Amino acid sequence: MFKMLLKNELADPKPLNDFLVDKTVKTASELNMVISVHTGILVGNWEDSLTTDLMYMIPMLKRHRNAKFDLYRAGIPWVRELGVIGKTFPNIWLNLCWCHVISQEMTCSALSEWIDFMPITKIVGFGGDYSIPLRRFMGILLWLRRM
């Protein structure tokens, strides 16, 4: 398969991708690292959010029971599905990073349902993948507010 990839003859890259993802998740799990996964809506226009449908993750979650997954963006628009996955799989945490920016209504709705549905320790209220430290980011916001 690797020789075919080098020659650009690999007709379907999915098996190779699946193999590499599985190896990466296994290694991260052995190192006791948390795997962050962007779920739901993607940044930008013309993106295919169906590729981040949470149902595609279930087979991997079953294969990697010792891995810890931090699922970003609350799976918007699939917040209920993410809630069920979060309750069903003990190795999953639901992360609300960027959700307050994407949709305040969906975020509030998701939180209301999740708090009623599962242990609150499974919910990360304000995580993120910011490129600058949050403290510096808040300083910038305060500075802009004064202008």
Image: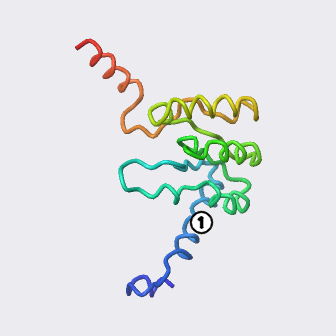
Find the residue positioned furthest to the front: 105
Q: Secondary structure at mark 1?
A: helix
**Residue at image location 72% in from the left, 62% down from the top:** 63
Quadrant where the C terminus sits is top left
| In this view, 55 is above or below 4 | above
* Residue depicted at 74% across the width and 48% down the height: 89
**Would you place residue 28 above or below residue 74 in this image?**
below
Query: Residue 101 location in percent, x, y?
Result: 44, 33
**Image check: 81 left or right of 41?**
right
**Disc 1 residue type?**
Lys
The quadrant holding residue 18 is: bottom right
The furthest residue to the top = 146
State the residue position of label 1: 23
- The percent coordinates of residue 138 (x first, y second) are 38, 22
- Which percent across, then down, holds residue 10? 45, 84
Left or right side of 14 for 139: left
Question: Is 133 in front, or is 30?
Answer: 133
Q: Residues within 10 Å of mark 1 (few under 14, many from 20)?
A: few
Q: Closest to the observer: 12 or 116? A: 116
Tell me which residue sits at (60%, 46%) in the image. 78
Question: In percent of the image, x 53 and y 41: which residue is there?
Answer: 73
The picture quadrant where one finds residue 90 is: top right
Examine the rendered structure and indicate whether residue 76 appears above or below residue 116: below
Q: Position of residue 103 (x, y in %)?
A: 49, 34
- Give the side of residue 45 with respect to residue 82, left or right: left
Would you identify the image quadrant in which residue 8 lies?
bottom left
Near-viewer residue (122 or 42): 42
